[in-house]
Image (tube, rainbow, N blue to C red):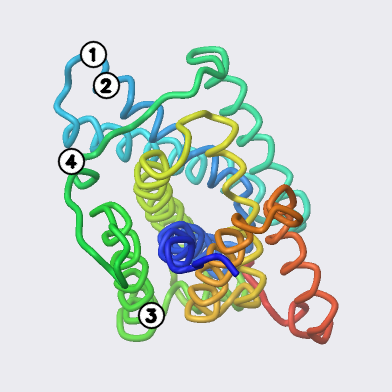
Amino acid sequence: MPDLTPFLVTGLALGSVYALAGMGLVVLFRATGELNFALGAIGAASAMTAWQAHAWGTPIALAALCGVAAATAISAGYGAFVSARVARRSNVIKAVATLGLALALLGLMYFIWGDTPRRLRLPLSALNTELFGVRVTGVRVVALVLCVMTAIGISLLLARTRLGLQMRALADGRDLSALIGIDVERVTLIAWTATGVLAGTIGILLGSLVRLEPGVLTFMVVPSIAAAILGQLRSLWLTLAGGLAIGVLEAIATPFQDVAPYRSLVPFIVAIAVLVLLPARTFQTTRGS
């Protein structure tokens, strides 16, 4: 039996990123009814922009901020010019629209940067600590801490602020929210902008944990969607637990030769299992538009 501790630590770090992205999906879905398939591509654009800015001589911290700013601009732009125009369409059409954004961004990134693997080295990567006898980089620690802090912060936002109340009202219906005086377009734009900030941060973190390549980063949205499904597209804490579990399951499969080639199937297996085991009404009652 191999020692699974190093893989457990690695899985927690990767699962933290999945959980962060899953929480971004949940918040946006609850506020707008849109399942954002472009979140991974927006994160990839952030990481590639940061890499390019650093390659041009920009200090890495400022380059990372440039990446997050680019992701925020993309997400906010979509929220302002596309989301508002498909807001009254079915959830399927809204999801397909975000898929179109993901494919457009992926094609643009391959056109600009190609598929050459790169590395994004953050200053945190040089900071090391030990956990259960395993060397852990600062990026992995920050990913886990940021994951938990984000869950706490978003929970407080939704439960105790006026904006959170407006988002929860919007989840019950756009028309009803507008009737009671909520600026629906403003709340929607805020939700998309916040998602862009989160996606940009996730892209920077993931770009330093895995191979920096547009396709790899874009398809990180798959395990994130699985985590969101585990959270039934409404629970941040279940999404957090789901993301961590998926990351750990993927990682601990690595030392087992028979299953290691199939570890990327873990998110799909988890998502299918949840969809099969949970009652259909669980997702029918989850609303976002």
Element carrying mark 3:
helix
Residue 155 - label? 3
**CB within 8 Å, label 4 to label 2:** no
Q: Label 4 sits on what residue type?
A: Pro
Residue depicted at x 53% and y 29%: 214
Q: Nearer the viewer, residue 282 or 4?
A: 4
Front disc: 4 or 2: 4
Disc 3 and disc 4: Cα gap in Å?
30 Å
| Residue 34 in view (yes/no) | no
Amino acid on which the number 2 mark rests in the picture = Ala
Q: Is residue 172 left or right of residue 190?
A: right
Q: Secondary structure at mark 4?
A: helix
Mark positioned earlier in the residue sequence (3 or 2): 2
Q: Are marks 3 and 2 in contact (CB under 8 Å)?
A: no
Seen from the viewer's position, the closer of residues 174 and 244 is 244
Q: Compared to 99, does 180 lie above or below?
A: below
Location of the C terminus (image quadrant): bottom right
Q: Amino acid at mark 3?
A: Ser
Q: Which mark is residue 123?
A: 4
Percent position of residue 33, x then y: 63, 63
Q: Marks 1/2: CA distance? A: 5 Å
Disc 1 crowd rating (10 Å Cα; few below 14, some 14-19, many 20+) is: few
Q: Which residue is mark 1?
A: 56
Of badges 3 and 4, the one in the foreground is: 4
| Residue at x 40%, y 45% (from the top left corner) | 209
Answer whether labels 1 and 2 touch (C-beta < 8 Å). yes
